[in-house]
Image (spheres, rainbow, N blue to C red):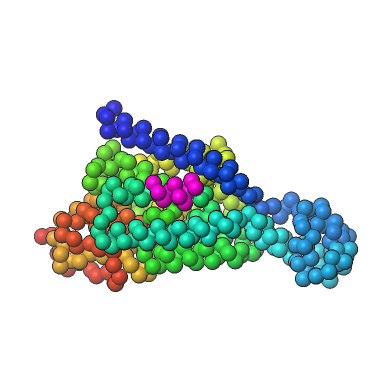
Amino acid sequence: MSNKKLNITLLFILTSFAVIIFSFYSTKIWSEKKEEITATHNLLFKTEMTLEEVSKKNKIPSKVILSAFQFTSPSKLTLTLGETGMSLEQAKVKIVKRFALYEENQTKNWFKIPLKFLLWFGFMFIVYRELKNRTMTPKRRKIYYILGFIIFGIILGADPSPMGTVKDAITLYGEKHVFFAPRMVALVIFLLTVFLVNKMICSWGCQFGAVQDFIFRLNRNKKDSRGIIKQYKIPFTLTNGFRIAFFITFTILAFMIPFDIVSAIDPFKMFKPQFLTIFGSIFLTIMLVSSLFIYRPWCHLFCPFGLTGWIVEKFSWFKIQVDYDKCDGCLACEKACPSFAMEGILRQEQTIPDCFACGSCIEICPDNAISLSVGKRTAPPKDHFKK
Ligand code: SF4
Ligand code: SF4
């Protein structure tokens, strides 16, 4: 094995273990709250049970039971479910929904979440300035990715994440038929960031996105233009087709069974390793190792936010643009782009793959023809690439 390959392997192992070990201790320091909310089938309801009995038997706080029926007086706890004026099924649905929202609220750290969003905005703004001013370099990119996964993953934890907002919204609605309002607000904010600057949150702010990108860049030459050990670009129709099929399967399972298939393989558990199962660890290892050779495998093949963001990205305000008056058609950007995104942008193909606003194309262009700017993309002049 050459020295370069050995270095890549060692750095890869070091990064992966360091993230897992530090995350383990960080999670302990934060003393993470309860992870999962109680499954509906674990709850017991009978017409003759008083509200107090329902509360005690199911470990549901009595205030939650009272609020489910909009009762204010604790004396109502002596009523049986049959005396609430509802059928058993209606009463059960009311309690289950209210309890789900209560538990969701209890699982959140309301100090950490706003802090994380504040830091996300600041961090993305700094990176945006680098891209806009063309000052991003391969070395700086790696530093930003390291900062990305240290701050938003190791220190501030796996939750929230762009991926988690989509996943949890679907699973909660699938099982309990409720939306948790703060999560919907978070999802809207994430999507607004995509709308503002395409996939900026995925590229730089998402904790697992940053890990994958950093690992991919470990295996790149000094100019960050190609892999040292061969890297592969999988056709977008294949990856996106798989991602859509996975999203549909995940949604159907969440509504029908309900079963959270994403949770079983969730690679964000890298930042809370005590929740990793054996199967989850094997899957995570596959994702990490393949990140050396394929650009962001989880984002392109599985991530529910990856798919949602890819749709919103079509309407992004700031995005990668090509000035064909300056472009001499050398295709350096297309080769340096870690995916087929630049090929789609450059030739204005009908389907443009996810662009992660990494800026590799901006950096490599010898004519300064590529920028992260506002406006509608234009098509290249006819025969532009045949010069
Ligand atoms: S697409 Fe990738 S970067 Fe974006 S939320 Fe999913 S895992 Fe994170
Ligand atoms: S087109 Fe490719 S190289 Fe350019 S910013 Fe997007 S993903 Fe990166």
The quadrant where residue 290 appears = top left
Residue drawn 60% across the image and 66% down it: 181
Across the whole image, how many numbered discs are drawn on residues? Answer: 0
Is the stretch drawn in magenta largely helix, strand or loop? helix
Residue drawn 48% across the image and 65% down it: 189
Q: Does 375 appear above or below 247?
A: below
- Locate residue 20, reporting x and y percent: 49, 39
Along the viewing direction, whichever of 28 and 333 lies nearer the viewer: 28
Residue drawn 26% across the image and 46% down it: 224
Left or right: 98 as drawn, with respect to 212: right
- Locate residue 160, reporting x and y percent: 53, 55
The N terminus lies in which quarter of the figure? top left
Along the viewing direction, whichever of 236 and 296 lies nearer the viewer: 296
Q: Does 78 appear above or below 30?
A: below
Outermost residue to the left: 387
The C terminus lies in which quarter of the figure? bottom left
The quadrant where residue 315 appears = bottom left
What's the magenta region? 146-155
Q: Is residue 152 magenta?
A: yes
Along the viewing direction, whichever of 89 and 59 lies nearer the viewer: 59
Q: Does 48 appear above or below 224?
A: below
Q: Is residue 321 magenta?
A: no
**Residue 16 at least partly seen:** yes
**Residue 251 at least partly seen:** no
- Locate residue 323, reporting x and y percent: 20, 66
Residue drawn 84% across the image and 71% down it: 85
Which quadrant of the render holds ligand 1? bottom left
Left or right: 321 as drawn, with respect to 107: left
- Locate residue 231, reporting x and y percent: 30, 42
Left or right: 20 as drawn, with respect to 102: left
